[in-house]
Amino acid sequence: MDDQTNKFFDVVQNNHARSVDDRVMPFLKAEDPGMEVFPMVNNFNGTDWVGDITGFLNNPDARAEFRKEVGIFLSSDHFRGLMVDFESFPNSGQKVMLPC
């Protein structure tokens, strides 16, 4: 979310990652506290948990695009991992196994 406009934006655009934080990451790099930052992906739209992600979870092409964009983003700042926090979605979407 853009902290100036409070609007969501696509983090990966045209196969390039857009900076999501111009304050914390530069500060951490300057201070070098020896900590890792793990960005989080969730299904929260700023107001509510978006429960209809079953279509995404059951779509191999959508999952492949997600993995590609996550890889682009994680490599943009040498992140070592990602936290995924999907909540409030139907049981039919919970049985899907996401391949690595």
Image: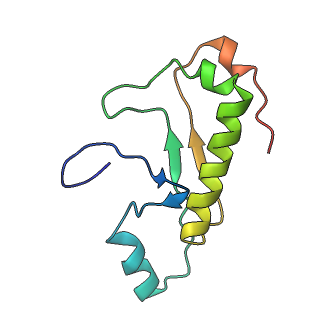
Task: Indicate the position of residue 99 as horizontal and vertical percent values.
Answer: 81, 39
Asked if residue 37 is positioned above or below residue 89 in the image, the reply reads: below
The quadrant the C terminus occupies is top right
The quadrant holding residue 50 is top left
Task: Indicate the position of residue 26 as horizontal and vertical percent values.
Answer: 39, 78
Which is more toward the observer, 20 or 40?
A: 20
Which is more toward the observer, 85 or 96?
A: 96
Q: Farthest residue to the left: give it.
A: 4
Relative horizontal placement of residue 15, taking residue 62 as reference (left or right): left
The residue depicted at 48 percent of the width and 86 percent of the height is 32
Which is more toward the observer, 28 or 100?
A: 100
Which is more toward the observer, 18 or 86?
A: 18
Q: What colour scheme was applied to this rendering of the protein?
A: rainbow
Relative horizontal placement of residue 60, taking residue 24 as reference (left or right): right
The residue depicted at 69 percent of the width and 21 percent of the height is 94
The residue depicted at 65 percent of the width and 59 percent of the height is 81
Q: Report the number of discs.
A: 0
The residue depicted at 56 percent of the width and 59 percent of the height is 73
Task: Indicate the position of residue 91 as horizontal and vertical percent values.
Answer: 66, 13
Asked if residue 95 is positioned above or below residue 9 in the image, the reply reads: above
Task: Indicate the position of residue 3 as horizontal and vertical percent values.
Answer: 24, 54
